[in-house]
Image (cartoon, rainbow, N blue to C red):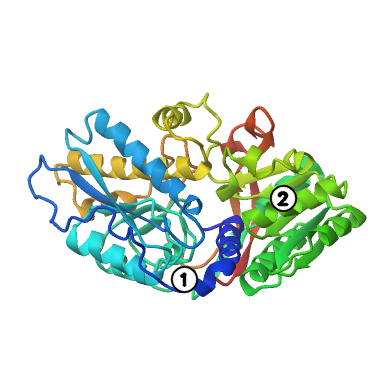
């Protein structure tokens, strides 16, 4: 079941895109990054083809969506350098959908129908318009980022965080998704936080995220301070002044990365000091020092929560393997680690096919994905399952990964192993 922070990330990202919404749908120049239209050979020595669809040239900017792609590509390069899957290379075919539904359908048609890929891996699409087509074709889509509700809607689609929804063609349970309050419970228990501000734009998607966060905070007994700013001309100075007068312990937001940096700068200038400025997994990267260079106090209060192991935890063997395999990348991020985990997930599925003598087929990979045993990608992920429940549970035990930014050290994991930072929390309904 997707947690509220996952829904929050999707809604917050939607809000971040509003400034470029007028650009309309378009096919990017790189819609066919690898322009071959030949079909995958059938012999057992041929490469195993997978597809990676990314909104790399979306109007938001390439850096927003490419980290998962880069993590997956790095894993497959590492895999091929060590013999591939039973001697067969994995060939990752890339397609940039440009952030549009038209481009996404074009990518799906090319990879699924023409290239006959065995699976899609680490999909990160702004508008996953081709999701139903992927599902109808029975192509497993492994470890995608749930920017929209597709991974809680269709069979054969397996998002990186799992789902307990029926996935019968309707999002969640009859159009309603559910998620827990574990993030808010964590800061209440560990930091004694009692007052939380929620900063949003005066725009539908941003306001929807803010309402979702507010409901979760209120369910955990917080006093909530709503802060709405104009999308076109946000007055972050006024927000910072109010945060100071309200003595907020925590700050959550439904705004884009640039807005967050400006908010932090305003908070520093106003002398606002909070227990935590809480961000999400998309901003869990090594670029924090540069992004928040003009807000040292706010930067010192940055915390992040997620469902995967901190990419800085190099004492863990799976993280060490990821860092070794991505040492040539200029920056590192949590989305890169999750893209690496998605590629590892596919590899384990493909190896299970070889072990059973079935050959690496879509059906065999899909069977592995549907098994009852939770998957952790060697400990990179909290246990992921896709066991459907007929009804959403009222409560659920949920664990989370927590880290804090420390200058000179990067993201430092808090409270030990993520598998032990767990809470029994209520599940709140929301609309996708």
Percent of width and height locating residue 59: 49, 63
**Foreground of the two, 366 or 209:** 209
Which label sits on residue 122?
A: none
**Foreground of the two, 103 or 283:** 103
Q: Which residue is mark 2?
A: 185
**Residue 211 in sight from this viewpoint:** yes
Relative to 190, does residue 208 appear above or below in the rendering? below
As drawn, the residue found furthest toward the right would be: 245
Element class at badge 2: helix
Q: Residue at x 42, y 72 (%)?
A: 25
Percent of width and height locating residue 299: 72, 41
Relative to 391, does residue 146 appear above or below in the rendering? above
Percent of width and height locating residue 200: 71, 64
Q: CA distance from mark 2 to mark 1?
A: 26 Å
Name the quadrant of the C terminus: bottom right
Percent of width and height locating residue 145: 46, 55
Q: Residue at x 61, y 61 (%)?
A: 12
Q: Residues within 10 Å of mark 1 (few under 14, many from 20)?
A: many
**Residue 384 in sight from this viewpoint:** no
As drawn, the residue found furthest toward the front would be: 29
Q: Residue at x 30, y 35 (%)?
A: 77
Which label sits on residue 171?
A: 1
Q: Residue at x 64, y 44 (%)?
A: 291
Element class at badge 1: loop
Instruction: Give the left or right position of residue 379, taking residue 371 as reference.
Output: right
């Amino acid at each position: 079941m997707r947690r509220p922070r996952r829904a929050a990330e999707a809604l917050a990202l939607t809000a971040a895109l509003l400034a470029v919404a007028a650009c309309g749908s378009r096919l990017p120049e790189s819609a066919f990054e690898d322009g071959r239209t030949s079909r995958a050979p059938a012999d057992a020595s041929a490469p195993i083809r997978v597809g990676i669809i990314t909104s790399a040239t979306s109007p938001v900017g390439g850096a927003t969506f490419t980290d998962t792609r880069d993590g997956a590509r790095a894993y497959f390069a590492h895999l091929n350098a060590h013999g591939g899957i039973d001697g067969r290379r994995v060939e990752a075919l890339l397609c940039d959908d440009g952030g549009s539904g038209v481009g996404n359908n074009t990518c799906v048609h090319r990879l699924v129908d023409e290239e006959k890929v065995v699976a899609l891996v680490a999909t990160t699409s702004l508008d996953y318009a081709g999701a139903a087509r992927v599902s109808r074709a029975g192509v497993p889509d492994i470890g995608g980022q749930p920017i929209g509700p597709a991974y809680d809607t269709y069979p054969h689609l397996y998002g990186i965080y799992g789902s307990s929804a029926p996935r019968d063609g309707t999002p969640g349970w009859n159009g309603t998704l559910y998620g827990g309050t574990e993030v808010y419970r964590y800061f209440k228990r560990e930091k004694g936080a009692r007052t939380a501000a929620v900063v949003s734009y005066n725009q539908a998607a941003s306001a929807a995220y803010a309402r979702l966060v507010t409901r979760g905070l209120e369910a955990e007994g917080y006093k909530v301070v709503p802060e709405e700013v104009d999308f076109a001309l946000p007055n972050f100075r006024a927000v910072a002044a109010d945060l100071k007068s309200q003595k907020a312990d925590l700050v959550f937001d439904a705004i884009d990365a640039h807005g967050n940096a400006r908010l932090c700068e305003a908070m520093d200038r106003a002398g606002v000091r909070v227990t935590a400025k809480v961000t999400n997994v998309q901003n869990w990267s090594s670029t924090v020092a540069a992004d928040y260079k003009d807000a040292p106090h706010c930067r010192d209060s940055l915390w992040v929560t997620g469902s995967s192991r901190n990419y800085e935890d190099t004492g863990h063997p799976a993280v060490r393997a990821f860092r070794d395999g991505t040492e040539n990348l200029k920056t590192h991020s949590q989305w890169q680690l999750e893209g690496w985990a998605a590629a590892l997930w596919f590899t384990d599925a493909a190896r299970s096919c070889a072990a059973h003598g079935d050959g690496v087929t879509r059906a065999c990979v899909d069977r592995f994905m549907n098994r009852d045993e939770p998957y952790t990608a060697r400990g990179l992920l909290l246990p992921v399952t896709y066991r459907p429940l007929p009804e959403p549970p009222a409560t659920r035990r949920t664990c989370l990964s927590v880290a804090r930014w420390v200058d000179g050290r990067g993201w430092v994991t808090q409270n030990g192993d993520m598998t032990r930072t767990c809470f029994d929390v209520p599940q709140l309904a929301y609309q996708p």
